[in-house]
C-alpha cells in the first residue's frame, strides 16, 4: 500500500467517523457539549474502522486477485 493511498484512507475514515459521530449525537447542537461528541466520535471511529476500511480494502484485494489494478483514492469535494 502506497503512502498516498494510506493517507487518503485514513482521512476518509476520520471524516466519515466525524459525520457519523455528529449524527449519532443528535446533530449540530452537540457542538455545545463536546464530551458527548467525543464519545459518539469514538464509537463511530470503531465502527467506521471496521466497516468502511475493510470494505474498501476488500475491493482492492478482490480486484488484485483478478489481476486488475486497484487503489483507494479519496475524492475531495
Image (cartoon, helix red, strand yellow):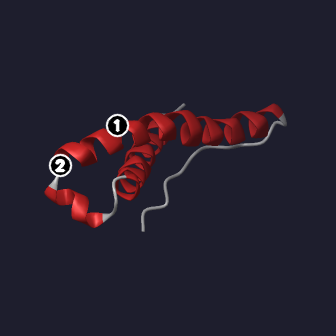
Relative side of 2 to 24, left or right: right
Which secondary structure, mark 1? helix
**Which residue sits at x=68%, y=43%?**
70
Q: Quadrant of the N terminus?
A: top right
Q: Which residue is more in the foreground, 46 or 52? A: 46
| Residue nearer the viewer, 54 or 66 | 54
Q: In the rendered image, which quarter is residue 31 located in?
A: bottom left
Closer to the camera in the image, 54 or 73:
54
Q: Quadrant of the C terminus?
A: bottom left
Secondary-structure class at tag 2: helix
Name the mark on residue 2: none
Most extreme residue toward the right is 66
| Residue 30 at x, y percent in the picture | 24, 58
The CA span between labels 1 and 2 is 12 Å
Q: Which mark is residue 34?
A: 2
Around disc 1, counting alpha carbons within 10 Å, would you say few (fewer than 14), some (14 to 19), or many (20 or more)?
A: some
Residue 7 showing in the rendered view: no
Chain-order first, disc 1 or disc 2: 2
Across and down, in percent, residue 51 comes to 58, 39
| Whether residue 33 is situated above or below residue 40 in the rendered picture | below
Q: In percent of the image, x 27 and y 65: which residue is there? A: 28
In the figure, is residue 70 to the left or right of 48? right
- For label 2, the crowd category at 10 Å Cα-Cα, with few meaning under 14, some 14 to 19 and many 20 or more, is few
Instruction: Identify the residue at horizontal 78%, vertical 42% (top origin).
Output: 68
Task: Identify the residue under disc 1.
Answer: 42
**Which residue is farthest bottom?**
77
Amino acid at each position: 500500500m502506497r503512502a498516498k493511498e494510506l493517507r487518503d484512507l485514513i482521512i476518509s475514515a476520520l471524516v466519515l467517523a466525524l459525520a457519523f459521530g455528529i449524527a449519532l449525537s443528535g446533530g449540530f447542537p452537540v457542538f455545545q457539549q463536546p464530551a458527548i461528541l467525543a464519545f459518539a466520535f469514538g464509537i463511530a471511529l470503531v465502527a467506521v474502522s471496521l466497516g468502511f476500511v475493510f470494505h474498501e480494502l476488500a475491493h482492492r484485494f478482490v480486484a488484485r486477485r483478478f489481476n486488475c489494478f486497484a487503489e483507494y483514492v479519496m475524492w475531495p469535494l
